[in-house]
Image: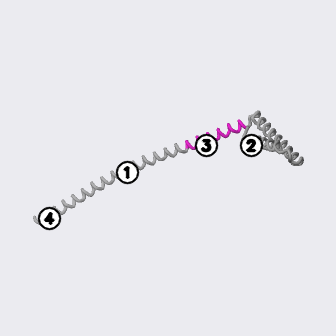
């Protein structure tokens, strides 16, 4: 039984207990209570029968199985997306490392060229001075 059925059953028990204690309550109120009790009992029986029918049909079980399957599918899709994102991040990191290596090589070549230019300038200046003095 679910919470609704349990609540209705407790309510019925309380009404029956209160109804049995007071003998001086008017018949009108007592009749009204019995009507409410009968209504609650019929409601409880209908609820129980509907749930029993649903369970017999397997529709509730099927609905829950579908919900579980949908949740598993969503979880799998999210995992795939996370894995794809991780792969992309790894590719970007590798690209950045390659670019950093290229920059390092270019800086070394630039420094080498600057060194050649400086030494060439030194030799040109030295040669000019030698020509002037000779």
The local secondary structure at tag 3 comes to helix
Q: Which residue is mark 3?
A: 74
The local secondary structure at tag 4 comes to helix
Mark 3–mark 2 distance (CA, rounded to whole Å):
36 Å
Viewer-side residue, 99 vs 130 = 99
Mark 4–mark 2 distance (CA, rounded to whole Å):
111 Å
Q: Which residue is mark 4?
A: 129
Asked whether 76 falls inside the magenta stretch, the response is yes
Mark 1–mark 4 distance (CA, rounded to whole Å):
43 Å
Q: Crowding near pointer 2: few (<14 within 10 Å), some, many (20+)?
A: few
Tell me if residue 72 comes above or below residue 114 in the rendering: above
Q: Nearer the viewer, mark 3 or mark 4?
A: 3
Residue reaching furthest to the right: 27
Identified at 52% across, 44% down, the residue is 84
Viewer-side residue, 90 vs 55 = 55
Q: Crowding near pointer 3: few (<14 within 10 Å), some, many (20+)?
A: few
* Image x and y of residue 15, in percent: 80, 44
Q: Tell me: 126 left or right of 30.
A: left
Q: Nearer the viewer, mark 1 or mark 4?
A: 1
- Which label's residue is closer to the chain start, 3 or 2? 2
Residue reaching furthest to the left: 134
Q: Nearer the viewer, mark 3 or mark 2?
A: 2
Residue reaching furthest to the front: 24
- The boundaries of the magenta stretch are 60-80
- Which label's residue is closer to the chain start, 1 or 4? 1
Q: Which residue is mark 1?
A: 100
Q: Which residue is mark 2?
A: 7
Q: Tell me: 106 left or right of 122.
A: right
């Amino acid at each position: 039984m679910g919470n609704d059925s349990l609540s209705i059953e407790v309510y019925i028990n309380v009404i029956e207990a209160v109804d049995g204690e007071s003998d001086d309550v008017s018949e009108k109120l007592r009749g009204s209570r019995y009507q409410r009790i009968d209504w609650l009992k019929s409601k409880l029986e209908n609820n129980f029968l509907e749930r029993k029918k649903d369970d017999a049909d397997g529709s509730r079980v099927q609905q829950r199985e579908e919900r579980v399957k949908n949740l598993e599918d969503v979880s799998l899709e999210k995992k795939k997306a996370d894995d794809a994102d991780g792969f992309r991040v790894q590719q970007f990191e590798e690209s950045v490392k390659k670019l950093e290596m290229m920059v390092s090589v270019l800086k070394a070549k630039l420094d080498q060229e600057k060194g050649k230019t400086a030494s060439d300038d030194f030799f040109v200046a030295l040669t000019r001075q030698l020509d002037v003095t000779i």
